[in-house]
Amino acid sequence: SQELEQSPQSLIVQEGKNLTINCTSSKTLYGLYWYKQKYGEGLIFLMMLQKGGEEKSHEKITAKLDEKKQQSSLHITASQPSHAGIYLCGADKVKDFNKFYFGSGTKLNVKP
Amino acid sequence: EAQVTQNPRYLITVTGKKLTVTCSQNMNHEYMSWYRQDPGLGLRQIYYSMNVEVTDKGDVPEGYKVSRKEKRNFPLILESPSPNQTSLYFCASSPVPWETQYFGPGTRLLVL
């Protein structure tokens, strides 16, 4: 079973459309991290959220951590082909204290 | 340039033949991790290291060994590889636990 559940598993959107990816934990999240991976390549850090209700933005990507700190969403506004890739959420302390866990990822394709 | 390097990038081997995947970072980071990525499972942590000579098991350590004799290097050792270790492997480093992990480009391993 996954400590972090991501939805949807895959997403195909038309260029210019908005989209949202969700990451849910059954336990309180003390640090939630979003990464992007281009297919077959290494991960690139996007954002870190720690406080309930926190929201961060970078270019057209906004991530939020809900007040209960058990769910995070990643929202992309006016998607572009450059946004295509796999988005993964990650967190520590969701199961064993010192280990780090990733969700299973969301594959995003953006059609020109 | 700040980076994490892994070698080799691609490897085909046979069951039981010992192999080592090297990982090196030039950012003087204390924390390093190994992950494996499999379809539908996201990334799973194999081992991590908090500093030289300090290592601990991640979520899926069976069949793997690591060592941390120098701060910059964190090799992953498969003493007797099996086909279920066929996967995409990533090394990562960070200055503090789990914040802004820098990932290597990945090593694609096929065990026949």
Image: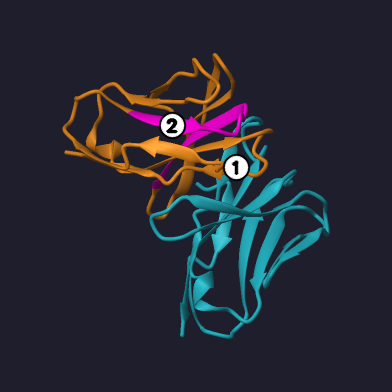
- On the question of residue B2 being in view, the answer is yes
Question: Residue B36 at x, y = what percent?
Answer: 41, 41
Q: Earlier in the sequence, mark 2 or mark 1?
A: 2
- What amino acid type should be assigned to the residue bearing mark 2? Cys
- Identify the disc placed on residue B101: 1
> Does residue B107 appear to the left or right of A21 in the view shown?
left
Is residue B57 a member of the stretch shown in magenta?
no
Q: Residues within 10 Å of mark 1 (few under 14, many from 20)?
A: many
Question: Mark 1 belongs to which subunit?
Answer: B
At x 69%, y 59%, the residue is A72
At x 44%, y 38%, the residue is B5
Magenta stretch in the rendered image:
B21-37
Whole-Å distance between the Cαs marked 2 and 1? 14 Å
- What amino acid type should be assigned to the residue bearing mark 1? Gln
At x 40%, y 37%, the residue is B6
- Please tell me the colour of chain B: orange
- Identify the disc placed on residue B23: 2
Is residue B29 a member of the stretch shown in magenta?
yes
Q: Tell which tag, 2 or 1, sits nearer the viewer.
A: 2
Q: Nearer the viewer, residue A89 or B54?
A: B54
Q: Element type at marker 2?
A: strand
- Please tell me the colour of chain A: cyan
Question: Residue B37 at x, y = what percent?
Answer: 41, 46
Q: Is residue B54 above or below residue B86?
A: above
